[in-house]
Amino acid sequence: MKLNIQNTFTSELPADSNPENYTRQVENACYSLATPITTKAPKLLHVNKDVANDLGFSKDDITSKEFENLITGNSIYTNTEPYAMCYGGHQFGNWAGQLGDGRAINLFQVKTDKSYTLQLKGAGKTPYSRTADGLAVLRSSIREYLCAEAMYHLGVPTTRSLSLALSGDEVLRDVLYNGNPAYEPGAIVCRIAESFIRFGNFQIFASRNDKTTLAALMNYTIRHHFPHLEENNKDDYAKLFQEIVNATLKMIVHWQRVGFVHGVMNTDNMSVLGLTIDYGPYGWLDNYDPDWTPNTTDRQNRRYRYGQQPNIGLWNLYQLANTFYTLTEDAAPLEKALNSYKTQFEEQNLAMMCAKIGIQTINKQDYILIQSLETNLKLIETDMTIFFRLLATANNIEDCIEAFYIPEQLTGEVLTEWQAWFDQYHTRLESEEISKNERIKKMNAVNPKYVLRNYMSQLAIEAAEKGDYNLINELYDLVQNPYEEQPKYQKWFAKRPDWAKSKVGCSMLSCSS
Ligand code: AMP
Ligand code: MG
């Protein structure tokens, strides 16, 4: 195994001076050293061969014991020192103070055409573990492993998965936080990203008025991720903020396009590169319902519901703007960037929705057509993914009948509303110059045929908990080509089955993972 290690994060940024691994507040440092624990019986369940290859692992490497030990934290790569990052965050609207990598341990950075950090999730405690155990269970690890890849192939910016392994240890979890803890199989995901820096990595230093470390981290971010900007330059710090605004918005518009609900958009879960990060109680819209959130911990306020994600993105950016202000001391450019989020959102969301319905030449009036579509989608339970996929070739609403959960409800006023919408829609399409075939092709490239519905992961989890990992392999294979027709997987182009409607793990997920 020969990797091109280049650890810039640990070599260029201030470290915690205390090498011990116990829970504490860590000041004036971007990270603390933390060694993964040894697990009882590590067992590799899945490797992402493409990612492994990109990182420089050979075919032989990924079948070796050495690799299994590496991605479960049982051995440390030569001359590297694993570490946990210090960050804070606003959780559910409130400042939560220091959080940090409580159960994520960064192994090292590998330099290929780009630089990637390898990070283990669930490999034991760090100085940021607070009262928790630093571990992860199989069900949440399968969900993270598969979903990151599903998102990647959908074209959504995201962290990626390298491997999924069992630790061989048992982990105690109270899934619904209702006083019923039980042991579950422990697991470790190795995930990769060009950077795992979150809004909260900046926020923690501003909250402590530690401008020195804040500037160091901001300069580091510029140097490695936004090299066209200048370090130690207040104007360029503001430009960096604008870039983060743009990247965040772009990511969220993709989420809205594919019907992904993150579930925990706390500022510690927001990447400064605009990557989808921390797959916890996320979910996919089955029936189109902007008020839906998978996260039972958020059931009362539904702060992180699907339709609210763009606004929460902006709220989070306001918090980050306050952090940037600590260094720039000039609010105007930061406010300008925040205002641009609103105008850009209007534009990009309209463009995205127009693309979903196959309109190429966007005109401002199209938002009316889109608004009435969104209203109609809520009239009776309508599957978002199936509806948009069928729309490409539909001549009328009856051609989309498969998208309705109770097709018999398509009568009376509901039917009239839909017929009226199709009339307007087809009139609008007539003013387009593109051919029908070309339009269908373009629509199929933005409306996925296959998404990783909540119940699908749940089936893979239930099988895996019984020792059968075939469905993990099948779903992994399926999500590689979400926009293609895959006749052998036609069964996954289906509405959520009734049993999954209110089942724990399908439509109800907690933060317990
Ligand atoms: P999350 O909501 O999963 O993004 O986690 C919020 C914070 O809690 C982060 O600082 C995590 O590192 C930490 N955390 C979550 N689960 C655990 C765990 N089992 N052990 C230690 N820290 C955890
Ligand atoms: Mg997190």
Image (tube, rainbow, N blue to C red):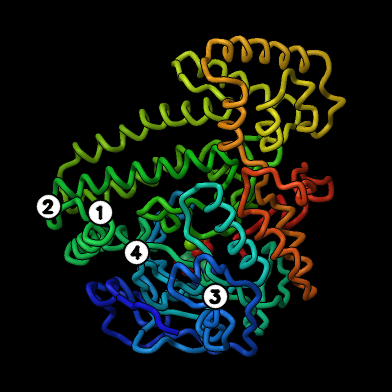
Residue on which disc 4 sits: 113
- Hey, what amino acid is under mark 4? Asp
Disc on res. 226:
1
Q: Is residue 147 visible?
A: yes
Taking the spot 56% from the left edge, 58% from the top edge, the residue there is: 149
Furthest toward the right, the residue is 408
Name the quadrant of the N terminus.
Answer: bottom left
Q: Earlier in the sequence, mark 1 or mark 2?
A: 1
Where does residue 494 sit, x and y in percent of width and height?
A: 77, 43
Within-10-Å neighbours for mark 4: few <14, some 14–19, many 20+: few
Residue 250 vs 232, above or below: the answer is above
Report if the beta carbon of the residue with label 2 is closer than 8 angstroms to ligand 2.
Answer: no
Ligand 1 neighbours mark 3 (CB distance < 8 Å)? yes
Q: Looking at the image, is mark 3 or mark 1 nearer the viewer? A: 1
- Which numbered disc, 2 or 4, marks the residue that appears first in the sequence? 4
Q: Is residue 350 left or right of residue 293?
A: left
Dot 4 or dot 3: first in sequence order is 4
- Taking 205 as reference, is 488 left or right? right
Q: Residue at x 63, y 72 (%)?
A: 46
Nearer mark to the viewer, of 4 and 3: 4
